[in-house]
Image (spheres, grey):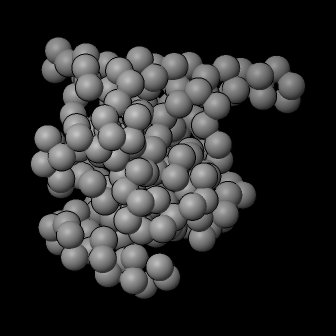
Amino acid sequence: MDRNAIMERVRAQMPERRWAHTAGVMETAVRLAERYGADPAKAELAAMLHDVAKYWAIEAQRRVLIESGEAGDLLGYDPALWHAPVGAYVAKRDYGVEDAAVLDAIRWHTSGRVGMTKLDKVVCLADYIEPGRDFPGVDRIREEAERSLERALVLGFDSTIAYLIANGRPIYPLTVMARNDLIRQLDKEADNG
């Protein structure tokens, strides 16, 4: 399936407001990819499909998680996390995406993971800072994104974790692990710099 066909199909199955977000993530992901040395075409494709399952019924997402073998411990956490692995599965099954790097960037855009690739980081951060996002601290994350992909992503994870704590919600452990891994990477760079 070519880029335009994928874009039209994705756009048709989501509310216009979510499509505006997706378009913003696509634009931001391409810019970040160019700035930090990831593949812009892969960044755009992953961003285009990152929320493809966002508006699916929770029960449909649960079925796909189980069917795909991606459920793991996710079913015990906020269903808002589910659309990412479901989206990766759907990108492959329904949109013909075979590129493992693109599928991983979709899969990990909500939680992050230890050992995030440059593409994973770009798509995850683009989702945080696209122009339509408006939450406390987003401008600081955007400013940091001009200097460091990793530091900006740590700030994004910090924002998510603080929000979950403030609202008495469980924190998905992989997000904490991803944050810690990024901090270790930054510490290592500082030690070598």
Question: Which residue is rendered at x = 67% and y = 20% of the image?
Answer: 184
Question: Which residue is rendered at x = 48% and y = 34% of the image?
Answer: 112
Q: What is the number of callouts on the image?
A: 0
**Image location of residue 53, percent across then percent down:** 27, 54
Quadrant of image for the C terminus:
top right
Is 156 or 84 nearer to us in this picture?
Answer: 84
Question: Which residue is rendered at x = 22% and y = 28% of the image?
Answer: 78
Is 144 or 36 nearer to us in this picture?
Answer: 36
Up/down of 83 relative to 76, above or below = below
Up/down of 66 relative to 83, above or below = above
Residue 103 visible somewhere in the drawing: yes
**Image location of residue 174, percent across then percent down:** 45, 23
Residue 136 visible somewhere in the drawing: no
Is 135 or 104 nearer to us in this picture?
Answer: 104
Quarter-wise, where is residue 51 in the image?
A: bottom left
Up/down of 7 relative to 179, above or below = below
Question: Which residue is rendered at x = 37% and y = 77% of the image?
Answer: 7
User: Quick one: which residue is furthest to the front in this view?
Assistant: 67
User: Quick one: which residue is furthest to the right in this view?
Assistant: 192
Up/down of 172 relative to 117, above or below = above
**Image location of residue 187, percent across then percent down:** 71, 21
Say left or right for 134 vs 3. Answer: left
**Image location of residue 87, percent across then percent down:** 36, 52
